Amino acid sequence: MMLAWVTAQDGIGIHLNEGEPLDNRIEAAKGGDRRALARLLTSIENGELRFSEPHSDGSEWKILALTGPPGVGKSCLLDRMLHEWVDHGLRVAVLAVDPSSPRSGGALLGDRVRMSVVDDDIKKKSVYLRSVATRKTSGSVPLVVRDMAFCLLQVGWDKVIIETVGAGQSEVRCAAVADRIVLVEGPARGDGVQAEKAGLLELADAVIVNKSDLDGAQRHANELRESLHLGHEDAPDVHLVSALYGDGVAEASSMLLTLEQSMRAGRARWRERLLSHHERLLLEHPEFDSLLMKIEEGLMSFEDAYAQLRDGNE
Ligand SMILES: Nc1nc2c(ncn2[C@@H]2O[C@H](COP(=O)(O)OP(=O)(O)OP(=O)(O)O)[C@@H](O)[C@H]2O)c(=O)[nH]1
Ligand SMILES: [Mg+2]
């Protein structure tokens, strides 16, 4: 399989497997051809194509992750916020990381919650929705998501939002590829602050408690503030909203546009990014599968196999 690289300068004349020059496809995607864009993203998903980070002066975020437990209302909230951001003149792409959970059954984005923003003939031109089927990707899921976000930015989208269920480590790492991380929570469920256990709270630049129309939302916001302030001075703000009724959504949408990175979250984020890269290096070693088999068959020790994987990448 051929692996093509696209750097910020792009314009490289590499052909993907289907024979069409890559730069044609990039130009088409830049010109608004959504089919060309979808095919670029699929090539990234299939491990045939990578994008490097577009140049940015770093003054504003480009990629934001919305993460939180299943069913807290991330998609509903995002739908509301997309309306606001598009009104603001932004073109926003969404990557929904399919959690591959039995709950969703691997449903495509939009099958679970219908995004109303795409029903608007004008607004839908400024929105691009794509789900990332993590079961299909070979290699490191977080880095595939990251490259897809870089691709979207390079072909001209202003902002990329990654929606991911904050359940497993891979999902936490998907969030960590973003410039900003927003944790979405729901009303208190009586089992304490789960986000703390999942390591999500330490990554968050802001926290939004959704479903303020339901009992326990205010209480959970208070619990979160308490956890966040334990031993930290620059704790992220906790906002209460109702995606269902729209309360607090306009404020939260504009707050997010100017959200700064919290110093505290920076370190945790770099840690997750380093781990993702390490994982990719190991997974992409040409001998990965054969070394795995040798360990399994007792032909090689774990230590020797690991040393070979690691050294081969230096
Ligand atoms: N009462 C109430 N219900 C809400 C609110 N926001 C979303 N919901 C409901 O919560 C359910 C889940 O909403 P989603 O937006 O799909 O939640 P999600 O976090 O994206 O879910 P996953 O992507 O499956 O993790 C839906 O039935 C929504 O109608 C809210 O503010 N108040
Ligand atoms: Mg969702």
Image (spheres, rainbow, N blue to C red):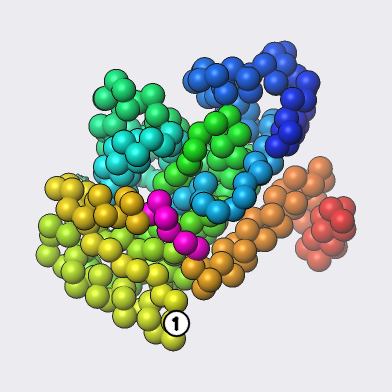
Residue 69 seen by the camera: no
Nearer to me, 39 or 8: 8
| Circle 1: residue type | His
Query: In the image, what residue occupies the spot 31% across and 76% down?
Result: 225
Task: From the image, give the main secondary structure of the stretch colored magenta.
Answer: loop
Q: Residue furthest bottom?
A: 231
Q: Which residues are magenta?
A: 256-261
Q: Is residue 206 above or below residue 60?
A: below
Query: In the image, what residue occupies the spot 25% across and 32% down?
Result: 116
Q: Secondary structure at mark 1?
A: loop
Nearer to me, 284 or 314: 314
Determine whether, in the image, residue 268 is placed left or right of residue 3.
Answer: left
**Crowding at label 1, few (<14), some or many (≥20) Cα neighbours within 10 Å?**
few
Check disc 1 and report the residue beneath it.
Answer: 232
Query: In the image, what residue occupies the spot 31% across and 73% down?
Result: 224
Quarter of the view holding residue 192: bottom left
Q: Quick one: quadrant of the N terminus?
A: top right
The image shows residue 180 at horizontal and vertical percentages of 48, 56
Q: Is residue 122 above or below residue 206?
A: above
Q: Is residue 260 part of the magenta span, yes or no? A: yes
